[in-house]
Amino acid sequence: MTTGTFAAAEASTASGLAGYAWLLIALPALGAAVLLLGGRRTNAWGHLLGCATILAAFAYGVALFISSTALDPEERTQDLHLFDWISVNALEVDFGLQIDPLSLTFVLLITGVGSLIHIYSIGYMSHDADRRKFFAYLNLFVAAMLVLVLGNSFVMLYLGWEGVGLASYLLIAFWQHKPEAGSAAKKAFLMNRVGDLGLAIAIFIMFRELGTTRYDEVFSRVGELGSGTVLAITLLLLLGACGKSGQFPLQAWLPDAMAGPTPVSALIHAATMVTAGVYLVARSHPIYDLSEDGRLVVMAIGAVTLLIGCVVGCAYDDFKKVLAYSTVSQIGYMILAVGLGPVGYALGIMHLLTHGFFKAGLFLGAGSVMHGMNDEGNIRRMGGLRKYMPITFATWGLGYLALIGIPPFSGYFSKDAIIAAAFSAEGWRGWLFGGVALLGAALTAFYMTRLLILVFLGQPRWKDLRSEDGREYHPHESPLSMTVPMIVLAVGSVGAGAFFALGDRLAAWLEPSVGPLEEAHGALSHTVVGILTVVLSLLGAGLAFALFGRKPQPATRPERVSFPVRAARADLYGNALNEALFARPGTWLTRALVFVDNKGVDGVVNGTAALLGGTSGRLRRLQTGFVRSYALSMLGGSILLLAALMMVRFS
């Protein structure tokens, strides 16, 4: 077979595989349907079906990815029309998928990391009576997330967007017997609706101005719009991204969502759902390329959020909430990157991928620790666990090194590249955003080292304590179903960054979707930034060792602390601000409207009814039913009429 014939055969295979891309969504959706509709009859094997469907989707995604690499870059974007979905006058929306490097990258992340988390959940949820339902919700979430990244239009994206919101609500509130779980799910659902409203309005504007919501048509015609309209669309899309990705000012829901099972934290709040906002901005890059002001706002939101996450993470004592604020911060880096434009789109996606490995591993490690510590989440009641949980300590430690950006671990290649690109912003913006990103690196090393010391190092503070239910602590290593996924993620934490970065391998792959990666020419070179980042990270880690590692730490946190610590413990008053600006005024407005409705609208309606009822009741007394009464009334009326006529006649 000649080379040309072989290449044609590979291209034909790739095209054929893409024609069945709907299986990526159908497999986990089928698993969710079987487990939810099958009920208790599927309890014995429901978790196995849940894992099998996501593993099958991952295998198909790998095959589709491999076949796509055989195509020329310009042929790697394929559109798959499944059926006509919405057809109302001028609105024509088909249920279609777009297979391209960006969507395939997310497919591999969602199904790959998702498969590991499904396997981990077998052991983590082994004693839960509703394990089958949990796997059904996981499958439902994965299916919705795949719709989000595979859709070929903004309406398809919105369908997956809302499906992810529903599935995340069900997963966060899975342990319904815990009041905090229900409250956290409601908070996440409502705050996400704020962002979803922005996304919906942006889609309405696109259809109103362009008559379409398909990616290819919108991006090819967006240049026809005025600068003000383009800016409005970018800001509304950013609002949607802030909701899903937990960015300022809608970041408060994400830490509270840790009330759900740990696999939920790893899947939704580390590797998939919270990265949807980054995907939205990267996918919409032709729109953002036309609005410098829109990109500036994106960068500002990312910079502010990464600092908020770092500062609050330094003060929390809840294991998963520290990691949650770390997620808020790292997503801030990604948002900052995609806001930089062509120099940052691919870098944001690269950090998204490396973060998916090490942050999912860190969350699963936290779940392993809590699994061995009677579900204890307070890090001040831990300590010295490296001797009792060596595999968890080793895998968590590798994720820790990747997160703080120590070379040659994955975070060094992705986060440092973003910091260097931030310095390339024009004028004072480069120094501002680059400086914020550098400060965030130092703070990240500080709070993560504090976490490492209080959980795994030092003296075992748990020996003289009991859990809330009165049990003694007996920390132990987790079963293989939990440790094997942690080991695989640890491997990604070590090598994924170098694999993506060397030779700009990931940037070249993503070029058909997000454009070519422009070289960053900033005030500081990449080498200088790399050295500064490592030095600052080591200083942050050293400061944490000096404060928490040199002397025994108390099992209860000090109550008398400085104002900055109190502010950080209070989420930098983010919840108080939302309460003051939105929740309380909303409550007062609702009460005022209820008062107006009760006393005003209902008063008029009820008063009219009472007037008519009272009047008719009194008039009814004149209808006695006796002829003599009617004759007397007629006589009286006649006399009055004659008297009136006589008065008129003789006046």
Image (cartoon, grey):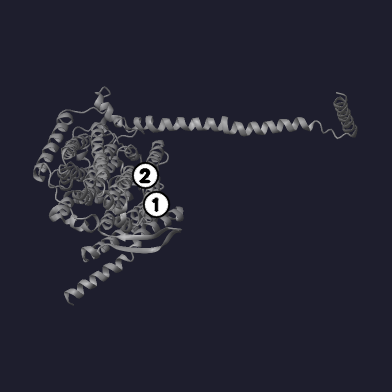
Q: Secondary structure at mark 2?
A: helix
Label 2, on which residue? Answer: 198
Q: Residues within 10 Å of mark 1 (few under 14, many from 20)?
A: few
The residue lying at 39 percent from left, 36 percent from top is: 180
The residue lying at 40 percent from left, 37 percent from top is: 183
Quadrant of res 587: top left
Residue in front for this viewpoint, 188 or 578: 578
**Residue at the far bottom in the pictured view:** 1
Q: Secondary structure at mark 1?
A: helix
Q: Position of residue 47 (x, y in %)?
A: 36, 53
First of labels 2, 1 by sequence position: 2
Label 1, on which residue? Answer: 208
Is 101 situated above or below 11?
above
Amino acid bearing label 2: Gly
Is 368 situated above or below 54?
above
Amino acid bearing label 1: Arg
**Residue at the far top in the pictured view:** 560
Q: Position of residue 534 (x, y in %)?
A: 12, 40
Which of discs 2 and 1 lies nearer the camera? The answer is 1
Residue in front for this viewpoint, 122 or 423: 423
Q: Judge left or right: residue 586 versus residue 522.
A: right
| Residues at marks 2 and 1 touching, judged by CB atoms closer than 8 Å | no
The label shown at residue 305 is none
Q: Position of residue 214 (x, y in %)?
A: 35, 57
Q: Judge left or right: residue 57 versus residue 182.
A: left
Query: Cα distance, mark 2 to mark 1?
Result: 15 Å
Residue 601 appears in the rendering: yes
